Amino acid sequence: PLLMLLEVVMDLMQPRLVERIIDEGIAQLDLAMVTRTGLLMVGLAAIGALGGMSNGILATRVGQGFGADLREALFRKVQSLSFGNLDELETGQLVTRLTNDVTHLQEAVMMLLRMLIRAPLQLVGSLVMVIVTIPQLAFIPLALIPFLLIVIVWVVKKATPMFGMVQGKLDALNEVLQENLAGVRVVKAFVRADYEIERFGATNESLMNQFISVARITTVMMPAMMIMVNLGVAGAMWFGGVNVTKGSMQVGQVVAFINYLLITLFSLMMVSMMIMGVA
């Protein structure tokens, strides 16, 4: 988390330095200022990249270790179950628990240590920088965020139960596959191959249709996000341009504000997607 915090801080400093280049360097024809600030940006970017890569390496090690330990614990637990429990749980469900579900939890841990730490830090930091950079235009993100939250809540509320149904379909598919592999000799001996192919195809198609239904719901989020982003950029350019013309704002301020606005909205989007993925 500390390495990710380092990367986020370095990223949030970049728009402020761009503002400095435009307003103090280019506007005053100060090439030395532009050069110094540009080199500082490169140095900060390198520090941020080092923090991000180190965080990625450690998060992967933690996630993979967690997955290995969890799979081992689950396998030991399955071996200790009674025959009654095994009949009730069914082989397909147990296979799904030890493979697909563990993989999802493993990915959730890695997301938690990377994106789910980065996105909230970026969201809070960029929102603060938006207000600090141009307080007069702070109403733009504050007006857009509630509308975006409404879309996110609707998508999460609709999609989360459907993901549970996808999991059930996957259990059924694993069960059919396991039965076919375990009883392949019986299937061939009684000439039941066509029936089993039909049965697997029906289960497979059911899983596909359920997943497509979930995808149709989740795809609403990105277009809504882009609409909000474009509206925010248009509003910032309009009101910022008017104030630049009046002389109450600088061009670099508006550029920095737009960058922080984009970071704020995309971070909010990222947080919502991570929460939905973990759920």
Image: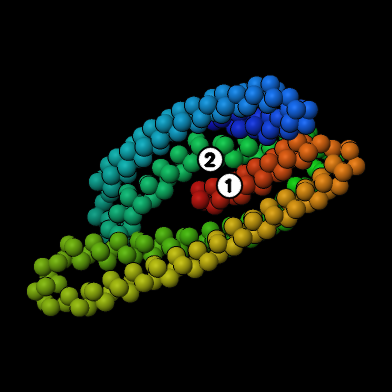
Q: How is the image coloured?
A: rainbow
Along the line of sight, which residue is nearer the eye, 15 or 159?
15
- Residue 261, quarter of the rendered image: top right
Along the line of sight, which residue is nearer the eye, 40 or 10?
40
Q: Residue 191, relative to residue 105: is it above or below?
A: below
Where disc 2 sits, the SS reads: helix
User: Residue 147 placed where, x, y %?
Assistant: 72, 56
- Is residue 114 something that shows in the picture? yes
Along the line of sight, which residue is nearer the eye, 4 or 155?
4
- Is residue 131 something that shows in the picture? no
User: Residue 159 placed where, x, y %?
Assistant: 54, 61
Identify residue for label 2: 115
Identify residue for label 1: 270
Q: Is residue 11 left or right of residue 49?
A: right
Q: Is residue 77 left or right of residue 234?
A: left
User: Residue 251 placed where, x, y %?
Assistant: 78, 38
Q: Are marks 1 and 2 in contact (CB under 8 Å)?
A: yes
Residue drawn at (62%, 35%) of the image? 121
Along the line of sight, which residue is nearer the eye, 117 or 37?
37
Residue type for callout 1: Met
User: Residue 194 placed where, x, y %?
Assistant: 20, 78
Where disc 1 sits, the SS reads: helix
Residue drawn at (58%, 47%) of the image? 270
Residue drawn at (34%, 69%) of the image? 204
Q: Residue 191, relative to residue 174: is it above or below?
A: below
Q: Is residue 273 left or right of residue 90?
A: right
Residue type for callout 2: Met
- Residue 90, quarter of the rendered image: bottom left
Of the image marks 1 and 2, the number of the one nearer the N terminus: 2
Q: Is residue 90 left or right of residue 227?
A: left
Q: Residues within 10 Å of mark 2 (few under 14, many from 20)?
A: some
